[in-house]
Amino acid sequence: MSRTLESTPAADGFRMPAEWERHAGTWMAWPERPDTWRDGAGPAGTAFARVAAAIGISEPVTMTASPAAIERARAALPEAVRVVELVTDDAWMRDIGPTFVVDDAGTRRGVDWIFNAWGGRDGGLYSPWDRDDAAASAILEIEGADRYRAPIVLEGGAIHTDGEGTVLTTEECLLNPNRTPHCSQAEIEHHLRDCLGVETIVWLGAGVFLDETDGHIDNLACFVRPGVVALTWTDDRDDPQYDRSLDARRRLEAATDARGRSLEVHLLHQPGPLSMTASEAAGLRKVAGSKARRAGDRLAASYVNFFIANGRVVMPLLDERHDDHAREVLAGVFPGRDVVGVDAREILLGGGNIHCITQQVPAGASS
Ligand code: KQY
């Protein structure tokens, strides 16, 4: 039975490990919403199943699904994937799942952030979101891991850590008045230190152009190992992403991490620009209170939205003109890991990508 603790991870000696540290497994959630996933979520289900299969080669995968979808999910997934019944509002496990923290003894606990569907009544993507907000707690119960309820609104896609005291995030997201408006930047930093066991916060400015998460870091930039960061990039100075990525690059190159290192930056040229086609938009069903998705909408496509699994990296394939280059860059920064591509356009149509639909459980024993 999972307990809710009144202290903080930092006070108890816990830290968020880097994604490349050993995993006990990964959680995902099955796609169902007809306003996010076209054609009854069939094509998205195929893409999610391929991601689960690619990760499942090297570590256990658990997929949540509602009672209405559980049979469909079971039939589409490899037998080794565990399917558990859990109703959520959508399928972004990175953002609704717990952020796991560990201590030096190998004990594992979880941080349960407040979730408001990427902005609540001020630009949030759908309402209600209470089932998403309850997901982290339910998962910690299943994992038998103790829980810290964080005092701020935050989605897992808004942070990336090197596991050695540094976290990367964006002002566009965490300082957005639609997240935790009563907290100053200093107070947000204080909560990040408490909840993640970090010392240094590296702030980037804006995220990917038209990213509906208000600029999640996991679409813009991420650590690939301590002191080394991958950043989405475009060589096209006329593209609206250019200034955003240039600003991020300058900030990264000027930053020092918690161990006193300068950061080395590797560029991943963005796909596209890509946009939603008329036939893709026609397969969506409008739901009252949710964001409309229209033909011609530019998609927030980025190769940074990959997932580091045990022994492999699972990357999105998004654009034949750029996929191979992205794969080469990733192979270069992840020596010793296989880089596996999965066709991820259907996930992109929902507003995120492979990193956004996965949440790793670090190795350790839950308490
Ligand atoms: O960036 C992420 N971690 C998730 C993207 C969520 C998109 C919601 N439609």
Image: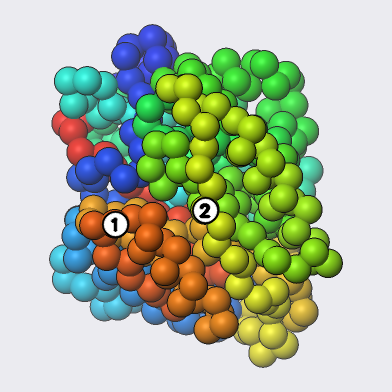
Q: The N terminus is located in which quarter? A: top left
Spot occupied by residue 153 in the image (x, y as percentages of width and height): 60, 32
The image shows residue 305, relative to residue 171, as above or below, that is below
Say if residue 147 shows up in the picture: no
The residue lying at 20 percent from left, 30 percent from top is 366
Quadrant in which residue 114 is drawn: top right
Spot occupied by residue 246 in the image (x, y as percentages of width and height): 72, 50
Say if residue 241 shows up in the picture: yes
- Indicate the secondary structure of the residue bearing disc 2: strand
The answer to whether 156 appears left or right of 36 in the picture is left
The residue lying at 50 percent from left, 43 percent from top is 264
Q: Amino acid at mark 1?
A: Pro
> 10 Å neighbourhood of mark 2: few (<14), some, or many (≥20)?
many
Residue that numbered label 1 is attached to? 335
Nearer the observer, 31 or 108: 108
Nearer the observer, 85 or 209: 209
Residue that numbered label 2 is attached to? 266
The residue lying at 65 percent from left, 46 percent from top is 249
Q: Amino acid at mark 2?
A: His
> 10 Å neighbourhood of mark 1: few (<14), some, or many (≥20)?
few
| Residue that sits furthest to the bottom in the current view | 279
| Total labels drawn | 2
Q: Is mark 2 within 8 Å of ligand 1?
A: no
The image shows residue 46, relative to residue 32, as above or below, that is below
Q: Of marks 1 and 2, which one's residue comes earlier in the chain?
A: 2
The residue lying at 29 percent from left, 36 percent from top is 141
Measure the alpha-carbon separation of dots 1 and 2: 14 Å
